Amino acid sequence: MAKPEPSSQVLRARLNAGLVALGLDRVDAEQRNLLIRYLALLQRWNATHNLTAVRDPLEMVPRHLLDSLTVLPYLPEGAVADIGSGAGLPGIPLAICRPAQAFTLVEPAAKRVAFLRHVIADLGLTNVQVAAQGSEDYYPDPLPDVIISRATAPLARLDAMTRHLQGPHTQVLAQKGPGVEAELAGWPRAATLRITRQDLATPDLPPRLLLSWRVPVTTP
């Protein structure tokens, strides 16, 4: 017998409890409504398009919504490029909670691009656009103020994918889980960067880490 789907009230209760645990009480009622609507769209599309391995919408709350929003207190102002956005994570949840900030979701897979464009239209997200290409082919002008990635690639690969996007004013944010020390050891350029670390404690999930850096400004 199929497991009954949790009601929107149950999903909202878990979201509300998670936001309290993260100290994100300032996320307002309309933004919470949009987050739940986004989750419903993700669940619906996931049934036929396989956008995420997480099938249970109750588990999507911490694994997708709350895990994305742990970055919110550390997200600088300015234009954000979400590299390898996939199903819009972390870009969509962050954009919902930062409606005055511009987000570009960089994603090459056609089925995911179609989903992202549907979400943007359905939720009326005027601060979000999609770049339907790989990051290596993404050459915006001006460069983004923030590059963010949620477990898209190992650090050395992520750096190589986005080196052309990293201007002197650009902040790079990489959400990482277990294994990050090995990634750092296998990334020679890490020794030349001042990398900051921030522990991310998502309710009901193992510890995460947010790594952040800027490219050093060289003087002639």
Image: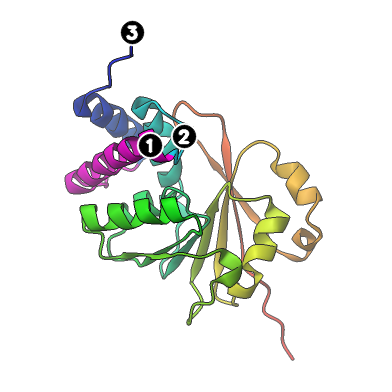
Image-based side of 131 in relation to 160, left or right: left
Q: Which residue is mark 2?
A: 202
In the rendered structure, are the residues bearing label 2 and label 3 in contact, judged by CB atoms less than 8 Å apart?
no
Disc 3 is placed on an element classified as loop
| Circle 2 residues within 10 Å: few <14, some 14–19, many ≥20 | many
Disc 2 is placed on an element classified as loop
**Residue 90 at x, y = what percent?**
44, 50
- Along the polypeptide, which appears first: circle 3 or circle 1? 3
- Along the polypeptide, which appears first: circle 1 or circle 2? 1
The residue stretch that appears in magenta: 24-49
In the rendered structure, are the residues bearing label 1 and label 2 in contact, judged by CB atoms less than 8 Å apart?
no
Amino acid at dot 2: Thr
Q: Nearer the viewer, residue 27 or 135?
A: 135
Label 1 and label 2: CA atoms lie apart by 28 Å
Could you tell me if residue 167 is visible in this image? yes
From the image, state whether disc 2 or disc 3 is nearer to you: 3
Amino acid at dot 3: Met
Q: Which residue is mark 1?
A: 48
Q: Which residue is mark 3?
A: 1
